[in-house]
Every structure is written in structure tokens, then in C-alpha cells.
Image (cartoon, rainbow, N blue to C red):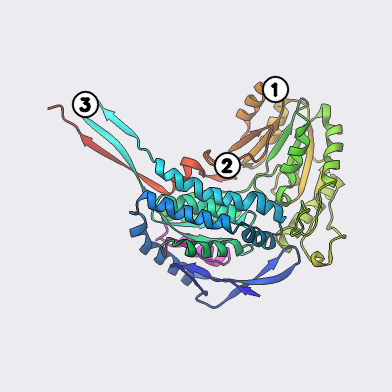
Amino acid sequence: MQTIGNYINGEIVAPAGGAFLDNVEPATGQVYSQVPDSDERDVSAAIEAAQAAFATWSTTPAEKRCAALLRIADLLEANLEAFARAESVDTGKPITRARVLEIPRAVKNFRFFASAILHERSDLHVMDRDAINYTLRRPRGVCGLISPWNLPLYLLTWKVAPALAVGATAVAKPSELTPMTAHLLAQICMQAGLPPGVLNIVHGNGPRAGAALVADPRVSTISFTGGTRTGGDIARVAAPLLKKLSLELGGKNPTIVFADADPDAIDGSVQAAFSNQGQICLCGSRLFVEEAIYRAFVERFVEKTRQLRLGDPLDEATQQGALVSAAHRDKVESYVQLARAERGRILCGGHRPTDLSDRCGGGYFFEPTVIVDLPASCRVNQEEIFGPVVSIIPFVDERDVITAANGVPYGLSASIWTSNLSRAHRVADQLAAGTVWVNCWLVRDLRVPFGGTKQSGVGREGGDEALRFFTEPKNVCIRTPSN
């Protein structure tokens, strides 16, 4: 059984308290490795290392920081298969998804932000012959980066790459449920020659390691992706310390299909509902379909859902893997039971599968589930389930569906399917969401701002937004007398 360590000051080290947590493979339900149960001592050591490294890293020329990140990207790409397998085993997701999408995206994160810093620009404001103002941006010091379990390497590198690129140093806290690719990333950083202390990775649970990172006054900046409740707890601690915060939280995202939608809307809606077993904050778990096509659409949607192949994540043909933990599987299952109590009809799925291989017999699997006949206001359609469960709701007209789509506490993303371009612009403008896709889903450009409204969070990541988040602007005003 493998035992992993923390990555502090350029070395892999055991936790100060000597305690470890079991790391379970979701597809089997069996413990397969041990992860540090770190406490405030480990976090403090990591912050101290990051503080010491900041003095040098923050003044390292952009070309050299770029080169260091590109070395990490190259090594990550060279070891793509090992990372993909580790991600699949650790999370329960199909290995093909990790191989084709998530690990390549982590590589792109490093390359994108590494090159972005070579194109830095500054604002200049000229005052009528009296003075000129120009703006400098300087890294914010030690940044705390807390990433979730659903897209472990993808979202960890989404934070690490821009922070390091601008010259900040970081202490990262991955989810204790999915630590393995963060551990492999630490080894890659050592191999790439990243200076000690520039990136530190402390494993452990939120109430101990995560809380210590958020509360330490030496950490100026916190970037968190995860649940809305945890985000609120972080804000309550960080705000009195005047830390800069970015919180990317939950979602209850609508997919809206109009009667004139292209037939691709079926496949797109299935993908939006069930990708990564529905464990993506951007998944479209509320599917609104115009009444004129509702019956035919539901019939085809259920047919497509039943064709999804659920099984061993390491099987190349698997499309639906395991949920991340027994507790999360139980939560998803409880919402399906609630749907039945609320008089919803389960058209397919709704159970734990019984036909799995011997290896996966004890795994945390749940069938892709389609529910109808529930009102938009019920709990199942208001609360984030974060699993392979979609509710399909008919609508009559544009105004009604906009009201229903916006009628949840969240506002992360939405997707619209229509051949009417004027309608697409009009509806997109009125949806309360940080991202709106039209005739597609999860098409991501690293240059655009990403984040949500309402209980889906505060702040934005991506492109210039990320580079600005990890830096502090400084205005320099120079008087220019006319004589």
C-alpha cells in the first residue's frame, strides 16, 4: 500500500503528527493508499517555506518563470498515462475521460499561463500636460489554493499555474479524497527543478489543514473551489483578516431546449447531465424542454441515457464510473428517494447497479437517473445533488422558462439550444449565470472569465482575471511640468 507525503520546501515529507488517512478507490470501495492527516504544524511549515521562496521567485524574470512552468507542462505531458490512471483510480471516473480531457487540460493550464506572462501590458493615463500615471502589478505573496475532488488535477493546476506565473508562491490543499495526482505533480515539480518553497502541497481534511491555511495571517490570498457551505465558512474567517478571496462554489444549472433546437441538443443535454457521473459544478441537472417537443425529446433522452455504459473505470469502454465516496453515493440516492416522495416519476435509473464485475462489486456506483413530473420549485430542483440525476421540466414560453431557470439560489452556468439567434442573445442576456453556452456545453476558452453569481460564488478565474487576482495593482504618478 502506497503512503504519500506532503510537498514542503521542495521535499516530500511525512506529516508532523505522524497521522494518516485512508484513501479509498471508489470503484472497489477498498483502501489502496495512505494520505497525510496534516495539521497546523504542516501548514505553518509550508507557509514559512513559501514566504522564504517569495523573495526570490517574485523577482525572477518572467522568461525564467515561464521556462519553469513549461518544463512542468512537458513532464506532465510525458507522463500523461500514469497521471490518467492515477486520476481514474483515485476518483472513480472513466480512464478515457482522464486521458483525453482532464490531464491534457492540466498541461494546457501550465502552458497558457506560462506564456501569458510574456505579454504583460500596463495601463497609462495622461493628465493634461501635468502628469502621467502608469499601473504596475506585483504578486500578492503567499497564496492558499484549495481545490476539490471532482476534477483534482484539472482544477488544482487552474490555480497553481497563474499564481506561480505572476511570481506569487503557493500552499495548495487538495481534497483528501483524491490526493494522488497532486502527489505526482509534486514529484514532477522536483524533477523540473522548481525552486524549493515556490509550490507547497499539504494534504489533509478541511477542518484541520484547510482551516489552518485560511486562518493564517501570512497567507494574503485564498482561491477556493468547492461547496457553497464551505465557501461561506471560509469567507467568515478570511474577511476579518482582509484576505483577497475567490470562491467558485456550487451550481444548479439549467439546460434550456427550444422546439427549434438542432437534433444535437439530445446528445449535448445527455453529456451535460451525466459527464463525470454528474460530478461537475457545470452539469445541467435541470433540463427545461419546450412543451411542443417535450414527449418526443424525453423519449429519446431516456433512450440515450440507457445506452450509457456503466462499469469499471479502468475499462476503456466505460462511460459512467463510480461516485467519489460511499457518503456521496448515499447523498445522491437520498435525493432520488426524495423525488419519489415528491411524486416524481423515475423513467430510468434510480438504483445502485447489480451487474458489476467482481472487482467493482463493493464500489460506489449509481445508475444515470432521469426524473419527470416534478415542479421547478421542489427541493430536488432547487438543491445541488452533484450526481448522475437530471430532472426534465416542460415549459410553454420564453418568459416562463427564464423565470424558472433563474429561480434557484445558484447562478453558475446555463446552456441554451435553439436555431433562433435573436432568441439566443435575448435569453442569454437575461439568465443569471456566469457562463451561458449556446448550442454547446463545456466549451472552454482559457482566456475568458469564469465564475458564478448568487450562491455560486464571488470573483472570477481564467485569463486576465486570474493574473489580476494573484497580483496587486500599484499606480505610479509622475509629474511632468511644462517648463
Q: Quadrant of the N terminus?
A: bottom right
Q: Is residue 291 something one can see in this rendering?
A: yes
Residue 354: percent from the left, percent from the top? 87, 60
Indicate the amino acid at tag 2: Gly
Q: Which mark is residue 452?
A: 2
Q: Are marks 3 and 2 in contact (CB under 8 Å)?
A: no
393 w.r.t. 91: above or below: above
Q: Label 3 crowding class (10 Å Cα cut-off): few <14, some 14-19, many 20+?
A: few
Q: Nearer the viewer, residue 186 or 401?
A: 186
49 w.r.t. 74: above or below: below
Instruction: Calculate the distance from the C-alpha at mark 3 to the C-alpha at mark 2.
Output: 42 Å
Q: Quadrant of residue 148?
A: bottom right
**Does the magenta portion include 88?**
no
Instruction: Calculate the distance from the C-alpha at mark 1 to the C-alpha at mark 3.
Output: 52 Å
Residue 358: percent from the left, percent from the top? 84, 67
In primary-sequence order, the first of circles 3 and 2 is 3
Q: Residue furthest bottom?
A: 18
- Disc 3 designates what residue? 129
Q: Quadrant of the C terminus?
A: top left
- Disc 1 designates what residue? 420
Residue 351 located left or right of residue 380: right
For discs 3 and 2, the disc positioned in front in the rendered view: 3
In primary-sequence order, the first of circles 1 and 3 is 3
**Does the magenta portion include 213?**
yes
Residue 302 located left or right of residue 68: right
In primary-sequence order, the first of circles 2 and 1 is 1
Q: Quadrant of residue 220?
A: bottom left
Indicate the amino acid at tag 3: Arg
Q: Nearer the viewer, residue 232 or 8?
A: 8
Q: Quadrant of residue 375?
A: top right
Q: Residue at the location (53% across, 38% down)?
A: 448
Image: magenta residue range: 197-220
